[in-house]
Amino acid sequence: MEPIPEELVEETWQEFAGFSRVGIQKETVKVNKNQPNLVAFMMEFTQDLDQEVRELAIYMSYVICRMFQKSSKKGLKRISPEEIISYYEKTERLIESLEGTDEKFLERIAEVQLSGQPYVMKYVLETLMEAPEEEEPIALTEEDIGYLFLLFKTLVDVIDKNT
């Protein structure tokens, strides 16, 4: 899939942030119906996180799904649990292989590895890095940020390849 334009990424997260409680419920029902395996993946893999960290992760996953829905003319193909786990394991291996790598080299790798959907991943990184700085901060540890990055990279990659 072509990269989702930065304007659409920005518009989507702002739109989602402006939804009423009912609007958010309607969006989550759509995603739950169309992508039950993605929802199950996020619910399962975030269950051991602190409640507010988990809520942020689930919220962000809905925003990401909405970004792809809005950018796709054909809609999103239902993604199987096997595909999700395959991408998760691939991303996990990539991250493990980068441990101890020089920071400048890591930045170059990130540019190449995240280039499939750079603006979606920019949203992910900015949200994770800014969460502790908000008015009502969510206490994200470095471990939380790393783990959520792994989940979101998996989510973005698997949706991107199936759109």
Image (cartoon, rainbow, N blue to C red):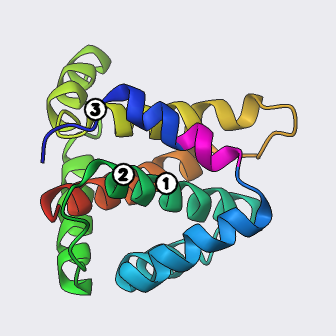
SS for callout 3: helix
Residue at image location 51% in from the left, 54% down from the top: 63
Amino acid type at mark 1: Leu
Characterize the local packing of mark 3: few (<14), some (14-19) or many (20 or more) Cα atoms within 10 angstroms. Answer: some
Q: In the image, which residues are magenta?
A: 13-18
Characterize the local packing of mark 1: few (<14), some (14-19) or many (20 or more) Cα atoms within 10 angstroms. Answer: many
Amino acid type at mark 2: Lys
Instruction: Give the quarter of the image for residue 132.
Output: top right
Q: Which residue is mark 3?
A: 118
* First along the sequence among labels 2 and 3: 2
- Mark 2 vs mark 1, CA separation in Å: 23 Å
- Mark 2 vs mark 3, CA separation in Å: 16 Å
Residue at image location 25% in from the left, 25% down from the top: 106
Amino acid type at mark 3: Pro
Say above or below: 49 vs 137. below
Number of the label disc, if any, that sits on residue 70:
2
Q: Nearer the viewer, residue 131 or 68?
A: 68
Tag nearer the camera, 2 or 1: 2
Instruction: Give the quarter of the image for residue 49.
Output: bottom right
Q: Which residue is mark 1?
A: 148
Characterize the local packing of mark 2: few (<14), some (14-19) or many (20 or more) Cα atoms within 10 angstroms. Answer: some
Residue 25: image x %, image y %?
67, 72
Residue 141: image x %, image y %?
65, 45
